[in-house]
Structures are given as structure tokens and as C-alpha cells.
Image (cartoon, rainbow, N blue to C red):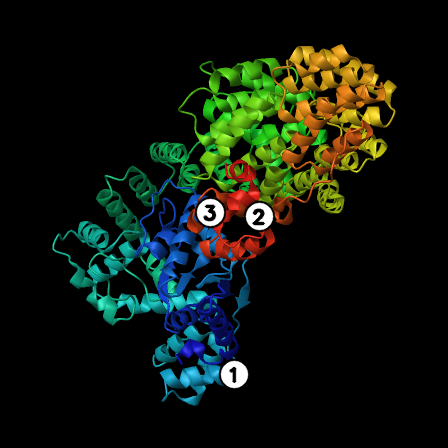
């Protein structure tokens, strides 16, 4: 065993268990952590040689310029070239597919060192991989250093702490490296090294010099860095310069050679001039086109900080020069060479950030904005650039960075939307609460809505961050909504962007509904719309009540985002489509989507994603008749929403409980739950969301004998329907008038509406058939009841299908109780997988769709076949029927 493995039997056994599990097809992840020099890298070195694995290895570097995926690019460089503009979610999916495919030939070990310095995109991909290794011959082994920069570096994966060596093991390390060291010196080394294996080895060698251990007042890490700096001081000057260039840059050997030649003024500098650093045990011998790899991160750190400032800046200037064809990298090194605030360089960095953001590379844009802010001489412009970094971190789902920046940004000189968006991020992610109107309204009367220097794109971006929160936070007509609409209306003109449309919709979902619907209908035909823009238009159509258009747009958005999107965008789009499926009664798709959202919550990370996913899962369970699951999920959602203070979001919980009670033939309870969404003084009231629930409220009211109260609700909603032009509200009111009056003409008028969904028609048919039967027109009622029954069965709404069958029996028709649908025997995830397999997708294609490994898909199919009574995927389509096409879309 090497020095760092002395006294590490327990750690080695734990890592061995991880490797043995992966070799046997039970993959997993483990993250080692501890202080610098404690032996993490040595454990990784041992693991790399401990079995018959294909090893993919990389190490992050402190403050290196990384457009994105610096660490992941190292890990996958032997087998995959990354496109810099890809989203972490997409890269994670592709990396998972790649390594699990490799593992079919031989087990794969992924080793990632210095995770505390990893770029955000790489850290996200590694966390994604670590959570999905189960049925695969793949192990992920990472390490990070314990310090203030490492908060959250483990990403929720299993961790193992490495502590100092015991006295006996520490003494053995010292004796190995300095067997002739006098007793007094050996004791001094043991005391100074504090059980740290690297310090024990280095101090033992250095102790031959009388002054070597005379820096006892320094922290251990600083003493180690100084030891390495002293070693480098004995190298030739040009070699020291080359090591500094390698420590500051991120390119390969060719970049190091070219930049060093510029600094030393000698074009003849060559790779051979690095040989003294190899012999001095500072770096490994570099490959012809490979990177220059330091033997320990503290050696790299020593070269970054152990040279004069003038030399370090000269190295950055040289790196900027050799990267002239890469504007982003050039700007980054120019900024690093600056010794004071410099507006032109800051502006260059901001421009690079804007280009990277537009190119879907938020991780790189974030670093550009942050460095630009550091170099900005003016206070107001500096805060604007910091705010851009904060919003970019939010887009990436990097909530730890959002929290940090919330404590740094001075919002006073910013535009009003940016100030409010920052305050909301502070409230949700730092204070972990939801204050309602108190926080929001203090912004409403502030002057300077758009101060000089405001940038339109940043204002729109800030609005997009905050408008969904405003939709769920305050009532229409609230002063803060009025203020935000004023900002939106004051922005310079031009074609309506989807960002402006969704902002107008969420700020004024009733007063501006007609305008928003017109804009959505005009804009959605553009073939150039990105998936994120399709989601914004689909959400706007949903909020304003055009269900047919919303369904088409949201389906397209989710389909496009599966090919590549940020996790935050994707979960938002899945949530919108899940709610759409609930409103349209597509129970099985709603269940599948709610399950998928719940699985992605750890990646998305926002506080309210989990309870909203559970609330929608509860609604889907209620619609299919699973009352126990519905109540369990609803209670779980409520237990998060109430303490958090997100009372308006309880409208989702009220909806799911109301729908569940309706399905369980408890109309009085259903009405009490649903009417709270319509009652301004009730917990769960929502001025806009209620407009989507008019039909179930009317159904519950009629069945519960609350006709007078229904009439009052109709009177309140009729003028809103006229003002908004909302199709779903018009359809709901037509239903309510028909059931209230028991009038054939009103039923037929309601059923002639061109915007009816299949669920709307089924509800009308059931109500009309019931009304006719009660008016002793049983024979006439049967066709309507029969049609409703078939629709409900097709949608998976078992309680409503049974209600239609009961009415048919009462109307004199013999109706047999149907056998259970095969699909209902499967879990939502199994149903999704089976539907995709039935459409002919391979296990790998399904895995890419669902962000798991193809071996995991195979394991699921192994359990699906006997449940459906089939023996191969060729029989799945027949077993599932039309569902296979509907759920695979």
C-alpha cells in the first residue's frame, strides 16, 4: 500500500464494495471528502488500479476559464466530444447512455477529483449520473476538499469522510520517507503534519533542512503550498513560467508552449523544457497533445499564487494572445491580467456572456457576468451585471449561487422588475418562506421604474423570473401587478416576444386574457419557435383557457425539450402539460407526467416543485379512483405548502381533493373543497385558477343540492367570461346553466361549442343523460350515457365511467362491469415504458427519453411482461391498445 493507504483499511473496504457491486451489475456512487492532503487522491489512484475497469478520470481546477463542462470534458475526452452549448440535462442523458453502453463490454469506473472546483454544468451532470446508476456496471467515485467552497459539492450522493491518520500509521509514513530522521525531528514532523498523509511525507523529506519546519504559525494547507513553491524555486526560470502558464490556463501542451514562449521572449521554448518539472515530481510527463497535469492540486495552487503578481499577469496576457480566435477565452484572460477596474474589458466580458446565454450556455455566461461585475468601475453598472449573473444562475438551477449573490447584489439602482425578482429569490431560497403581498407591495409605489441604463432584455428576463410567482402570489388588481404591467407597457415597442406575452398573461390573466390569446394565436404559427418559447405560449394559452391550443403547444414544447433543455425549463413544461392532462381528463398521461416530474425534482431543486408535483399526482389518482393515493399525496403537498406560506398554491390541493371526492360520490365534500378556490376569503382562493374549474364546481353543486349557490357563482363569472373570451370558462358556464335549468335547449347549445374537448363533451352527455332519465325519458338518455361511458373508460376516469354505467342501468340498459384495463396494473413509470416500447422504441431510445440507463429499462420490462400477460415487446401494442400511441407522444 502507498503512504495514503496506511491506516485506511475501512475506507478501502468501502470503495472495494462499490467497485465489486459495479462489476456485478449493481452500480452506484460514492463521494470522498476531507481536508487537502488527507489522501483522497491516493484512494482514487488505488481505485483506478483495483479492478478490471475502463477508467474515465478527470480533475477540476481552481478558477480556470471553463466555457462549460471542463471536468466532464476531461472525463469523456477519450470517448466523446462535447458541444459547448448543450444543456447539462442533455449532456447527462448522453453521458449516461455512453457509459452504460461501454459497460456492456467491461465495467466502467468514473473518477472525478477536486469536485469543489468543478464548473456548475459538470457538477450537475455528475449528480445526474450518480442518481441513476443502479442496474449498471458503472461506478462513480468522486472527491472534494472540505472548505467553504465545497458547500453542497457532494450533490446529495453517498459520502465518506476521511480523517487524519492514527499515531501508529502516521509514524510509519514518516519512517518510510525519512528512515534516518532523528527522533526529535520525527516528533516535530508528526506534530506539524497533524496526521495528514501528504504533509507527513513532504515534511519528512523537507525536515533535513534546519529551517524547513519553521513556519508553524501557518495553516497546514499554506505550509504545504509553501513547501511545493520552495521546490519549484529550484527549477529553471522558463520551466517555472511554463508551470505558471499551465496552472492559469486550461489548454493542452501546445498552448503552454506557445504562451510560455511569449512570456520568456524565446520562440524556441519547447515541451522538453518541462522535463525538470517532471523530474522534480511537480507534474506528470505530458502527452504530445494532452494537458499538463500537476501531481497534486496544491502544486497547481502553489504555482498560481507563489509567483510575483507581474509574472502572473504576463502569463494571462500571453494566454489571451494565443487565444485570439476564441473571443470568450481571450476576454477571460485579458480580464485576469487587469490590475484595476476596466470598463472596456468588463463590457467585452458582458458581451461574451450575452452571446453565450443566447447560445444556451448559461454556465459560461454566468462566469462572464460575474467577472465583468468585478472589473466594472461604476456602481450601478456593476450591480446590473451581478443581477445578470444571479438570473443566469437561476436559469441553471444553481440555487446555491443564487443564495450567495442575493447577499451581494445591491438592488437599489436596478430596474423595478430586477429588484423584485431578487427579493423573491431571497425570500424563497434564503428565507425559505412565502410572505405574500407584504413583500411585494412595498415595491409598488417606488419611483424610477426604469432608471437610466436599464436594458430591455434584462427587464424582460427579470419579469420572466418573477411573473409565475406573482401569478400564484397576489390577486389581480394588486398594486404590485399594476406596477409590473406599467413597466412592461413602458418598454420600447417591437414584435411581441414570448417573454412579453407570458409576462402580460401572468400579470393580468383576466384583464389581459383577450389580448394575450390574440397574441398567442398570432405567434404560435411561427416555425422558428424554440421549445422554451412553445412552453411560454402554451402556458399562456392554458392560463387564458384555450385548452385545445394549449395542449398542442405544450406537447410540442415537451417533445422538443426532450432533445435538449435546462432542467428548470423541462420541469416547468412537464408541470404545465401535467396540469393540462388533468384538465382534459387524460388520467394515465397525467399520472405518467407527475411521476416523471417527481423523479426530476432533485435535479431541479426549487422548493415548490415537489409539492406541486405531488398535488398533480394526487389529482390524477383521484380521477382514476385511487382515493387513498390521492389523499396521501395531497397531504404531503399540503405539509410543505402551508409551513412555507404558499397559501395560494393550495388551490391545486383543493382541486385534487374536490375531484377525488366527486369520483367517490361525495358531492357535498367536493363542493366544499372546490368552492374555496372561488371564495376570496378562503384558504386556496385563486382569482384566475378558479376559471379553469367552473365545470367540476357546477357538477358538485348540482349533485350536492347547492343550486342557489351555483346560481350566485354563475352571476359572478358571467361578466368575466365576456371580458376574457376564455373558452374553458365559457364551456364551464354553459354546462352550469344547462344543469341548473335542466333545459334541453341549453344542453344542446352547450354541446355545440366548437372548443369542447372530449372530456367536456362527456361531462355534458352524462349530465344531459341523467337529466333526461330523471325526467322519465330513459330511452332518449341511453345514447348520451353510453357515449359518456366510453369516453370516460378511454380516458381512464374509472369513477365517472362507473357513474355513467349506473345511470345506464337505471335507464333500463343492461351494462356489464368491465374487466380491469391491463394498463391499470402498471405503475405510471411502467406504463410509460411499456407505451414507448409498444411504439417500437429500443431500450436505449426509451432510456434517453426518460433519463435513465437502458439496463434500467430492461429491468422494468422484465417486470412489465408478466403483469400484462405478454412474453415479448411485440405483444405490448395489443395489450395496451390505443394507449401505446397516446402515452408515447
Q: Quadrant of residue 331?
A: top left
Q: Secondary structure at mark 1?
A: helix
Q: Is residue 295 left or right of residue 707?
A: left
The percent coordinates of residue 462 (x first, y second) are 53, 29
Q: Residues within 10 Å of mark 1 (few under 14, many from 20)?
A: few
Residue shown at the point (70%, 31%) measured from the top left: 789
Residue 377 visible in the picture: yes
| Residue nearest the observer in this picture, 33 or 447 | 33
Q: Secondary structure at mark 2?
A: helix
Residue 462 visible in the picture: no
The percent coordinates of residue 493 (x first, y second) are 47, 13
Q: Which residue is mark 1?
A: 167
Q: Are marks 2 and 1 in contact (CB under 8 Å)?
A: no
Q: Secondary structure at mark 3?
A: helix
- Residue 829 badge: 2
What distance separates the C-alpha of mark 1 from that of mark 3? 54 Å
Q: Earlier in the sequence, mark 2 or mark 1?
A: 1
Q: Which residue is mark 3?
A: 846
| Residue nearest the observer in this picture, 44 or 114 | 44
Quarter of the image with the N terminus in it: bottom left
Q: Quadrant of residue 140?
A: bottom left
Q: Is residue 345 left or right of residue 135?
A: left
What distance separates the C-alpha of mark 3 from that of mark 2? 12 Å
Q: Is residue 884 left or right of residue 78?
A: right
Q: Residues within 10 Å of mark 2 (few under 14, many from 20)?
A: some
The percent coordinates of residue 69 (x first, y second) are 38, 49
Q: Earlier in the sequence, mark 3 or mark 2?
A: 2
| Residue nearest the observer in this picture, 727 or 874 | 874
Amino acid at each position: 500500500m502507498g503512504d495514503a493507504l496506511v491506516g485506511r483499511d475501512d475506507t478501502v473496504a468501502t470503495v472495494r464494495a462499490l467497485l465489486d457491486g459495479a462489476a456485478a451489475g449493481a452500480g452506484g456512487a460514492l463521494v470522498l471528502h476531507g481536508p487537502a492532503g488527507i489522501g483522497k487522491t491516493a484512494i482514487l489512484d488505488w481505485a483506478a488500479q483495483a479492478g478490471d475497469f475502463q477508467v474515465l478520470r478527470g480533475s477540476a481546477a481552481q478558477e480556470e476559464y471553463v466555457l462549460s463542462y471542463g471536468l466532464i470534458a476531461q472525463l469523456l475526452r477519450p470517448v466523446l466530444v462535447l458541444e459547448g452549448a448543450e444543456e447539462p440535462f442533455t449532456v447527462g442523458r448522453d453521458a449516461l447512455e455512453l457509459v452504460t453502453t461501454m459497460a456492456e463490454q467491461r465495467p466502467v469506473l468514473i473518477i472525478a477529483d477536486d469536485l469543489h472546483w468543478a464548473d456548475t454544468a459538470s457538477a450537475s451532470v455528475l449528480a445526474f449520473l450518480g442518481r441513476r446508476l443502479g442496474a449498471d456496471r458503472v461506478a462513480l467515485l468522486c472527491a472534494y476538499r472540505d472548505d467553504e467552497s465545497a458547500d453542497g459539492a457532494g450533490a446529495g450522493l453517498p459520502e465518506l469522510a476521511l480523517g487524519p491518520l492514527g499515531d501508529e500509521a502516521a509514524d510509519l509514513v514518516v519512517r518510510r520517507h525519512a528512515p534516518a530522521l532523528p527522533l526529535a525531528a520525527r516528533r516535530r514532523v508528526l506534530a506539524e503534519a497533524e496526521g495528514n498523509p501528504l504533509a507527513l511525507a513532504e515534511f519528512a523529506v523537507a525536515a533535513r533542512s534546519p529551517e524547513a519546519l519553521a513556519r508553524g504559525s501557518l495553516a497546514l494547507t499554506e505550509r504545504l503550498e509553501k513547501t511545493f513553491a520552495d521546490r519549484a524555486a529550484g527549477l529553471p526560470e522558463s520551466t517555472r513560467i511554463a508551470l505558471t502558464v499551465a496552472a492559469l490556463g486550461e489548454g493542452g501542451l501546445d498552448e503552454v508552449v506557445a504562451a510560455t514562449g511569449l512570456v520568456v521572449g524565446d520562440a524556441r521554448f519547447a515541451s522538453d523544457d518541462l522535463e525538470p518539472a517532471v523530474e522534480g515530481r511537480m507534474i506528470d510527463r505530458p502527452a504530445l497533445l494532452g494537458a499538463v497535469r500537476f501531481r497534486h492540486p496544491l502544486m497547481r495552487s502553489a504555482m498560481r499564487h507563489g509567483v510575483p503578481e507581474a509574472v502572473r499577469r504576463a502569463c494571462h496576457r500571453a494566454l489571451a494572445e494565443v487565444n485570439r480566435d476564441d473571443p470568450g477565452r481571450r476576454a477571460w484572460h485579458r480580464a485576469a491580467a487587469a490590475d484595476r477596474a476596466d470598463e472596456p474589458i468588463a463590457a467585452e466580458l458582458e458581451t461574451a456572456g450575452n452571446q453565450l446565454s443566447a447560445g444556451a450556455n448559461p454556465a459560461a455566461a454566468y462566469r462572464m457576468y460575474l467577472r465583468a461585475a468585478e472589473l466594472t468601475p461604476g456602481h450601478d453598472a456593476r450591480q446590473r451585471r451581478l443581477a445578470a449573473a444571479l438570473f443566469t444562475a437561476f436559469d441553471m438551477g444553481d440555487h446555491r449561487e443564487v443564495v450567495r449573490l442575493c447577499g451581494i447584489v445591491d438592488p437599489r439602482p436596478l430596474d423595478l422588475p430586477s429588484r423584485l425578482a431578487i427579493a423573491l429569490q431571497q425570500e424563497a431560497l434564503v428565507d425559505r418562506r412565502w410572505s405574500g403581498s407584504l413583500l411585494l407591495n412595498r415595491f409598488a409605489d417606488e419611483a424610477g421604474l426604469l432608471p437610466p441604463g436599464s436594458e430591455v432584455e434584462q427587464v424582460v428576463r427579470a419579469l420572466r423570473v418573477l411573473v409565475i410567482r406573482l401569478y400564484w402570489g397576489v390577486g389581480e388588481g394588486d398594486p404590485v401587478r399594476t406596477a409590473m404591467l406599467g413597466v412592461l407597457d413602458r418598454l420600447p415597442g417591437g414584435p411581441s416576444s414570448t417573454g412579453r406575452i407570458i409576462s402580460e398573461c401572468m400579470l393580468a390573466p383576466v384583464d389581459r386574457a383577450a389580448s394575450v390569446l390574440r397574441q398567442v394565436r398570432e405567434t404560435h404559427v411561427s416555425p422558428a419557435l424554440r421549445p422554451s418559447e412553445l412552453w411560454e405560449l402554451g402556458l399562456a394559452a392554458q392560463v387564458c383557457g384555450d385548452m385545445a391550443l394549449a395542449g398542442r403547444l405544450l406537447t410540442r414544447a415537451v417533445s422538443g425539450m426532450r432533445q435538449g433543455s435546462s432542467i428548470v425549463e423541462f420541469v416547468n413544461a412537464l408541470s404545465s402539460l401535467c396540469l393540462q392532462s388533468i384538465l382534459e381528463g387524460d388520467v394515465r398521461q397525467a399520472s405518467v407526467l407527475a411521476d416523471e416530474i417527481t423523479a426530476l425534482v432533485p435535479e431541479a431543486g426549487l422548493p415548490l416543485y415537489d409539492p406541486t408535483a405531488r398535488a398533480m399526482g394526487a389529482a390524477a389518482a383521484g380521477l382514476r379512483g385511487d382515493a387513498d393515493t390521492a389523499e396521501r399525496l395531497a397531504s404531503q403537498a399540503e405539509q410543505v405548502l402551508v409551513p412555507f406560506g404558499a397559501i395560494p398554491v393550495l388551490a391545486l390541493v383543493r382541486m385534487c381533493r374536490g375531484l377525488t371526492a366527486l369520483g367517490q360520490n361525495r358531492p357535498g365534500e367536493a363542493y366544499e373543497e372546490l368552492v374555496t378556490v372561488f371564495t376570496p376569503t378562503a384558504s386556496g382562493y385563486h382569482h384566475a385558477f378558479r376559471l379553469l374549474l367552473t365545470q367540476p364546481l357546477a357538477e358538485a353543486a348540482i349533485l350536492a343540492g347547492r343550486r342557489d349557490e351555483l346560481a350566485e357563482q354563475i352571476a359572478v363569472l358571467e361578466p368575466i367570461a365576456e371580458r376574457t373570451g376564455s373558452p374553458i370558462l365559457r364551456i364551464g358556464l354553459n354546462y352550469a346553466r344547462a344543469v341548473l335549468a335542466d333545459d334541453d335547449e341549453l344542453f344542446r347549445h352547450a354541446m355545440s361549442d366548437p372548443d369542447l374537448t372530449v372530456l367536456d363533451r362527456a361531462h355534458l352527455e352524462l349530465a344531459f343523460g341523467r337529466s333526461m332519465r330523471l325526467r322519465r325519458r330513459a330511452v332518449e338518455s341511453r345514447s348520451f350515457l353510453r357515449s359518456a361511458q366510453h369516453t370516460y373508460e378511454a380516458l381512464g376516469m374509472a369513477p365517472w365511467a362507473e357513474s355513467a354505467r349506473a345511470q345506464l342501468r337505471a335507464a333500463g340498459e343492461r351494462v356489464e362491469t368491465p374487466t380491469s384495463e391491463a394498463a391499470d396494473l402498471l405503475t405510471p413509470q411502467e406504463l410509460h415504458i411499456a407505451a414507448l416500447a409498444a411504439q417500437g422504441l429500443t431500450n436505449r431510445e426509451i432510456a434517453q427519453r426518460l433519463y435513465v440507463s437502458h439496463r434500467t429499462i430492461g429491468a422494468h420490462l422484465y417486470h412489465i411482461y408478466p403483469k400484462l400477460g405478454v412474453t415479448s415487446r411485440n405483444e405490448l401494442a395489443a395489450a395496451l391498445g390505443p394507449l401505446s400511441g397516446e402515452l408515447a407522444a
